[in-house]
């Protein structure tokens, strides 16, 4: 009887190794699609068909799509690169219940995408707000992350706000005034505010102009 128990455990151990091995070798297929998450569907695209650990890109925002990360498709020559638009923007579901726009839900969107793609672990590249989301994801699911890569990290909003105020002070008085007045009034759609913000972006955000060219949504 004891011998049968030992054999049974040996079989279970072998099956476990086989399952884990299969999961770790899941190969991503290039292409795009949608995956269902709480609140709607999110869009994703996979570029590259290598067997190497994939790189998942977490864009900034929130509410700003992943279009500006398109140049990183070149990394697909080395390993799979996973693009996706977070819920509420870009090619994902845009009509979303505002009560779902929480950090916890964004973290679970990321985890649901990982599960549906069959990815065991990945490199996470986060930009701006994506660094905050990436860090919260890592704190909850550390075993899924092989390494973190942060660009323009915003891990402290108070520090980010202070730094932004210092940058605004370097702009012409009229631009500073337009930003201040419209921020206080909440009139973010006003032409003056939009013009002022574009000037801020052109000075401190966009490295290559014109700005519209950087927002090209195509992959070709």
Image: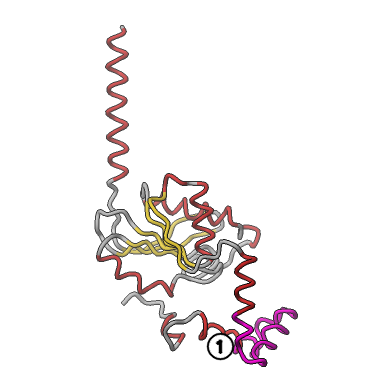
Count numbered badges in the picture.
Answer: 1
Q: Which stretch is magenta?
A: 167-195
Q: Is residue 41 left or right of residue 173?
A: left
Dot 1: element? helix
Q: Is residue 48 left or right of residue 199?
A: left
Give x and y (percent) for residue 73.
33, 69
> What is the quadrant of the C terminus in the image?
bottom left
Q: Is residue 124 left or right of residue 108?
A: left
Q: Relative to 98, say whether 204 is above or below.
A: below
Q: Residue furthest right?
A: 185
Query: For residue 171: magenta?
Result: yes
Q: Residue at 27%, 54% (x, y): give it.
A: 52
Q: Residue at 49%, 57% (x, y): give it.
A: 134
Give x and y (percent) for residue 71.
35, 74
Q: Residues within 10 Å of mark 1 (few under 14, many from 20)?
A: some
Q: Relative to 195, say whether 140 is above or below.
A: above
Give x and y (percent) for residue 183.
70, 79
Name the residue that disc number 1 marks.
199
Displayed quadrant of residue 48? bottom left
Q: Residue at 39%, 54% (x, y): give it.
A: 147
91 and 180: which is toward the camera: 180
76 and 143: which is toward the camera: 143
Q: Relative to 48, say whether 177 is above or below.
A: below
168 and 12: which is toward the camera: 168
Give x and y (percent) for residue 219.
34, 74
Which SS type dominates the magenta stretch? helix
Displayed quadrant of residue 8? top left
Q: Residue at 27%, 52% (x, y): give it.
A: 27
């Amino acid at each position: 009887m004891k011998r049968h128990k030992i054999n049974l455990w040996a079989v279970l151990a072998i099956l476990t190794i086989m399952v884990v091995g299969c999961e770790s070798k899941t190969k991503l297929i290039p292409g795009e699609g949608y995956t269902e998450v709480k609140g709607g569907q999110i869009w994703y695209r996979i570029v590259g068909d290598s067997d190497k650990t994939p790189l998942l890109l977490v864009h900034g925002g929130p509410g700003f799509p992943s279009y500006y990360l398109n140049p990183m498709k070149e990394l697909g020559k080395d390993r799979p690169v996973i693009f996706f638009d977070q819920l509420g923007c870009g090619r994902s579901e845009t009509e979303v219940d505002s009560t779902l726009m929480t950090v916890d839900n964004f973290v679970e969107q990321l985890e649901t995408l990982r599960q549906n793609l069959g990815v065991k672990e990945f490199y996470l590249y986060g930009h701006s707000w994506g660094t905050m989301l990436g860090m919260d994801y890592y704190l909850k699911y550390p075993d899924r992350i092989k390494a973190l890569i942060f660009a323009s990290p915003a891990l402290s909003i108070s520090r980010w706000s202070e730094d932004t105020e210092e940058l605004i002070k370097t702009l012409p008085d009229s631009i500073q005034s337009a930003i201040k007045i419209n921020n206080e009034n909440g009139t973010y759609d006003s032409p003056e505010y939009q013009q002022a913000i574009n000037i801020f972006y052109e000075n401190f955000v966009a490295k290559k102009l014109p700005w519209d060219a950087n927002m090209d949504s195509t992959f070709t």
